[in-house]
Amino acid sequence: MGDRPVQFEILSDQAVNFHYSKFPWVNYQDRNLNISIPIFSIHGNHDDPTGADALCALDILSCAGLLNHFGRSSSVEKLDISPILLRKGRTKIALYGLGAIPDERLYRMFVNKQVTMLRPKEDEDSWFNLFVIHQNRSKHGATNYIPEQFLDDFINLVVWGHEHECKIAPFQNEQQGFYVSQPGSSVVTSLSPGEAVKKHIGLLHVKGKKMKMHKIALETVRTFQMEDVVLADHPDLFNPDNPKVTQAIQAFCMEKVELMLDNAERERLGNPRQPEKPLIRLRVDYTGGFEPFSIHRFSQKYVDRVANPKDIIHFFRHREQKEKNDSDLNFGKLVSRPASEGMTLRVEDLVKQYFQTAEKKVQLSLLTERGMGEAVQEFVDKLENDAIEELVKFQLEKTQRYLKERRTDAEEEKIDEEVRKFRESRKKNTEEEEEEVREAMTRARAHRSEDAVLVAASSDEELMDTGMKSTGDSDDGLPATLNRGRGRARGRVRAARGQNSTRGSSRRGRGSTSQESATSSRTYKPVSMPAKNMSIMDAFKSLKPTASLNSSKSFSEDIIDDDSDLEDISTVPSSKVNQRLSTTSSLSKRGSQSQISRGVDFESDEDEFDPFKSTATSRRTK
């Protein structure tokens, strides 16, 4: 905030750049706000949009006018990245942004050429192209990262988030030709070697097609010292057969910690806001017959001097990895493998590997390993408690419909054969399987949202009943008390059913009108679902005329949710209500991606050079 005018202008269509926002324009052009330094930000993997409304933390800051949230994608199958076009004098910047997306999904989209970076139609070679991304840069698995070669070669600079190690100085990718700057995290978030690198931010100067990065050290970061010790490398100091070798190792570690404390004190920048106690980490490899000493007793000596006394020493053993065949995978060993071996395992991979190596009697016969793996991933990562249940129900219903259409005889062997064929066809059609998983996850999120509404309504009914019972013996006071109780309950139910209701009657510059609030509030459509799912055999029995009446008894009566119940609240317990909110989304498929060359310079005090003057350029129209 401030009175200093903004010196650049936006040339692109802001309705396209901020189409998902309630305020589709840049904040410094809002007449009710006085912005001097506009901030543009993409979301990361810890604040990605989730839930029924697909909201994230940056949406709150954006609606408050504090920053401009861009780079958000609405499609999960195709991405068209449209830049924010900025101009200041003769310098023009095309700012591309892509918020965090699951790495496996984005990797697959790049491979299938479904990611397109749009370019300005006029003078496309005169723009400085800056791309902001938040994905895994280092390889954590076969597809659990984004290779730099996937990005278009017309980009001049990539600002890469998510990785915590500070590599702020731009590094050139020799194959693609662009530069990559990795700012890293601003504070130490884990006791790992990458976090021990000094923290910086960067001030980027751009003039025409030339750029210069100025590193600025952060002065309020807690100092962090880390060192590794291998006991086997000091045979002159430590002998495993010596009965007092443990005491010798402890004394050696104390000397190391004292040296690290001295180094941390020397690295202090003198800022009064910088924390005094440093972070110390000494990793000790005791391979070779050595025994570790008591860490708790050792840490007591540094309680007043170190910020992490309990984590100063970390003992580990170096294990040589042996070559193993893929057919000899053991699920138990995969789960218990220590993190020190440097292998990152995902839940989806564990599920897939388990069923590939499991016995025949515990193999999946109806579901697919991929769908089950993604459902378990949603349950683990995003706490979608109904993800697995909804996936099972969805695939069961789809299989039942398939068998009915095939008019298969109600014999167990023939049913098993048809189910097996249907499962194999679904495994080959990956796009259809992904659509099934998305539909099941949508059901699970809707189920969670409705459960929250029902819990709120149930608690309001209890409050209303309490208010009715505590009215006293006076007949005159009874009607007034009952009316107050109903009013409070009705108000709470409305607030629970409409998540976008505004709070307070005053309206500020970026506030929405009552009509906008009414149209943007969430609407629930009544959907009836059976209270109990039929098995496959029951589904076939229901096709017979003699069994039609009996099979219909397995379904409970449909409960229709109408808006009229907001006025008259019934006292039916919430546990009897069984609803599911199902939504479907039509997603576009196919995209194309091309690569276009470009040139970029670094400015230096000695001279200026242009390493890409001879680079050929190709065009893409926006």
Image (cartoon, helix red, strand yellow):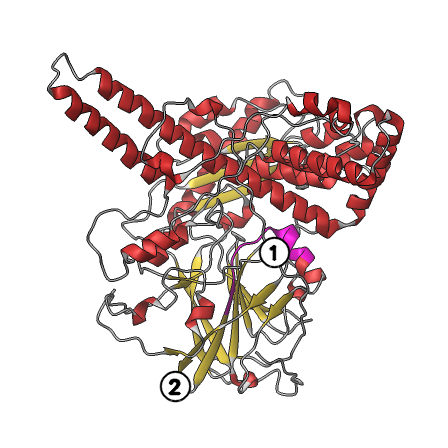
Tell me the residue that label 2 is attached to.
Answer: 89
Image-based side of 107 in relation to 306, left or right: right
* Residue under the image location 27 percent in, 67 percent down: 35
Quarter of the image with the N terminus in it: bottom left
The answer to whether residue 1 is magenta is no
572 vs 332, nearest the viewer: 572
55 vs 599, nearest the viewer: 55
Tell me the residue that label 1 is attached to.
Answer: 586
Number of the label disc, if any, that sits on residue 174: none
Q: In the picture, residue 68 is in which quadrant? A: bottom left
Sooner in the amino-acid sequence: mark 2 or mark 1:
2
Q: Amino acid at mark 1?
A: Ser
* Residue under the image location 62 percent in, 57 percent down: 587
Q: Position of residue 276 (x, y in %)?
A: 33, 42
Image-based side of 361 in relation to 501, left or right: right
The residue segment tinted magenta is: 96-108
| Res 72 visible | yes
Q: Position of residue 66 (x, y in %)?
A: 32, 59
Image-based side of 472 in relation to 440, left or right: left
Q: Residues within 10 Å of mark 2 (few under 14, many from 20)?
A: few
480 vs 180, nearest the viewer: 480
70 vs 346, nearest the viewer: 70
Kind of element beneath mark 1: loop
Q: Position of residue 433 (x, y in %)?
A: 71, 46
Marks 2 and 1 sit apart, C-alpha to C-alpha, by: 43 Å
* Residue under the image location 31 percent in, 35 percent down: 567
Q: Residues within 10 Å of mark 1 (few under 14, many from 20)?
A: few
Query: As displayed, is residue 603 above or below residue 497?
Result: below
Q: Position of residue 479 (x, y in %)?
A: 17, 23
